[in-house]
Amino acid sequence: MHILVTNDDGVTAPGLLALTQEMKKLGKVTVFAPDRNWSASGHVKTMERPLRVRETILADGSPAFTSDGAPSDCVALPLLGLLEEKVDMVVSGINPNANLGHDVTYSGTVTAAMEAVIDGLPGIAVSLDSPENHGGKLDYATAASVARRVVEQVIAEGLPKGVVLNVNVPYLKESELKGFMVTRQGLRVYRDELDRRLDPRGRPYYWIGGQAPTGVDEPGTDFGALRAGYVSITPLQLDLTHHKMMDTLKKWKF
């Protein structure tokens, strides 16, 4: 089993290291991650400039590759042939914040896993629901262990083509977890605000700010599972077609 590990927070992120160490228990691991933070980058692929790749070392001495490309590039490059050995699975994370509901369209963590699925490989994204405004280092031990347990099941059972697993882990000790729950996407509530400012020359510029997003706590959703102390596992598909709407559109007179 050859597992490609990546993320969207950069190659030096502690969540990447924790994930790498757990994946090594399951087979060969190659780390290929961005050289900087690409959080909320969405599904980006670099087409208009060359990409640079260099070798580096993680904090525990493990070798890794890093690129100036986006998270999706860090999956595409090795799968397109930069690595000589065939990759069997891509695991992305561990993101320091949960990726719930519509977050999956923004998340570089999730879209890196989607890049694997586009190439026909299993893709798993892992995120930690860390406390808002948490100070100090985050503890990734539970999320890393959960990631290993999920990957073990994917190795044993397989995944259908076109399916990404979006895994979100409560910020709890492993012994405190209520269990694992298969969920649907919940409703994320964004509270973005436009902050207009002027630079020293009087020219306007803008920040997209506002309070942190919340979610609707409904049973059976990713948000609801986390709030109840469960690991949320949401199977996502890349086919976004609204099939019922197709029948409606066919009746329109274009």
Image (spheres, grey):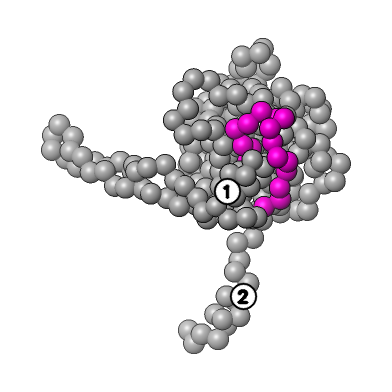
Front residue of 38 and 217: 217
Q: Residue furthest right?
A: 156
Residue 3, given in percent of the width and then of the height, sits at 75, 32
34 versus 100 height, above or below: above
Asked if residue 127 can be seen in this view, the reply is yes
How packed mark 1 is, by other alpha carbons closer than 10 Å (few <14, some 14-19, many 20 or more), is many
Q: Residue visible at 42% across and 42% down?
A: 212
Front residue of 183 and 41: 183
Asked if residue 73 can be seen in this view, the reply is no
- Write down the residue under mark 1: 223
Residue 28, given in percent of the width and then of the height, sits at 79, 26
- The span picked out in magenta is 168-183
The disc, 2 or 1, on the residue closer to the chain's N-terminal end is: 1
| Residue contact at pointers 2 and 1, CB within 8 angstroms | no
Label 2: which secondary element = helix
Q: Residue furthest top?
A: 61
- Write down the residue under mark 2: 244
Label 1: which secondary element = helix
Quadrant of the drawing holding the N terminus:
top right
Front residue of 96 and 33: 96
